[in-house]
Amino acid sequence: MRLVLLGPPGAGKGTQAKKLQQKFNLTHISTGDIFRANIKNKTELGQEVEKYTSAGKLVPDALTIAMLWDRLDQEKEKNFLLDGFPRTIAQADALKEGLAQRNCPLDAVLSIEVDEAVLVERLAGRRTCPQCGASYHVQDAPPKHEGICDTCGSELVQRPDDTRETVQNRIDVYRRQTEPLVAYYEKEGILFHINGNQSVDAVFDAIQAALNL
Ligand code: AP5
Ligand code: MG
């Protein structure tokens, strides 16, 4: 199974990806997570991309596409779940061409759709674990002990791009540059609309129903 999770910042792509990965044994590839790991480790790539991610702007296509193939070509099993890629028409074209060459086209694209006010609330309350990547929400999905990751015990942090101003910019960038991909994949006949305004479990059920799983 080869899937793409499409949706604005805070839609729940990462949250659903973790559940899909666990239940169906898919490799979860999040371009945002790869960029954050590089920033944390102060790699050359991390230093190059930080100015874009911290402002809520997209990293240039050439850099992002090269990184994606680098990661995807490490996979022997071609079962994967892309989270946060593609985000532009150029990225979608590159993905289509590259997967065709590798004989493994996409099966489905899930567009997780959420009201804007809900997105802003979710991101303002999100806390993440810098060690294992687990995600929490101060009200809706708090950790057992405040500020501490349930899974690995590390101290939780707020993502630097989760300030209100940057969140608004990320949503605007999504509308301008990424939302056109909904029509792109509708034309390909592989797009499923998912109502992301529901509980985490209800969204997961909607995804499985859409995929006939
Ligand atoms: P990326 O890391 O992909 O961020 P994003 O798309 O802005 O999305 P988020 O990770 O913020 O949200 P999410 O949808 O994963 O939601 P989550 O599950 O965490 O990208 C970051 C940056 O990297 C970009 O701005 C760009 O600079 C760069 N980048 C990445 N990919 C790129 C690309 N392809 N091209 C160019 N640049 C790229 O949930 C959010 C919160 O809500 C959590 O607290 C969660 O607990 C809660 N929640 C989730 N679902 C529910 C629910 N159903 N009900 C209640 N609460 C919920
Ligand atoms: Mg995410």
Image (tube, helix red, strand yellow):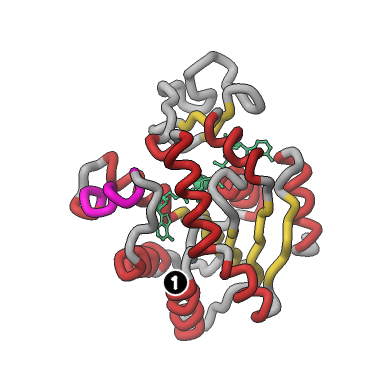
Helix, strand or loop status at disc 1: helix
Q: Residue at x 60, y 64 (%)?
A: 3
Residue shown at 57%/43% (left/top)? 10
Query: Is residue 61 depicted above or below 196 in this figure?
Result: below
| Picture quadrant of residue 6 | bottom right
**Label 1 belongs to which residue?**
91
Left-right relation of 107 to 68: right
State the residue at coordinates (39%, 65%).
68
Residue 47 lies within the magenta run:
yes
Magenta stretch secondary structure, dominant: helix
Name the residue at 57% across, 78% down. 105
Name the quadrant containing residue 120: top right
In this view of the protein, which residue sits in the foreground, 88 or 147? Answer: 88
Q: 168 and 82: which one is in front?
A: 168
Quadrant of the frame with the C terminus: bottom right
User: Is the distance from the Cβ of mark 1 to the nearest ligand 1 atom less than 8 Å?
Assistant: yes
Q: Position of residue 129 (x, y in %)?
A: 45, 31
182 lies left or right of 97: right
Q: Where is residue 175 in the image (x, y as percent from the top left)?
A: 55, 59
Q: Residue furthest top?
A: 145
Residue 192 rendering spot, x and y as whole percentages:
72, 65
Can residue 79 be seen by looking at this rendering?
A: yes
Q: Does the magenta stretch include residue 61?
A: no
- Crowdedness near tag 1: few (<14), some (14–19) or many (≥20) residues, C-alpha within 10 Å: many
Front-most of residues 154 and 173? 173
Q: In this view, does 25 lie to the left or right of 204?
A: left
Task: Identify the magenta region.
Answer: 46-54
Q: Quadrant of the N terminus?
A: bottom right
Query: Total number of numbered labels?
Result: 1
- The kind of residue tagged 1 is Gln
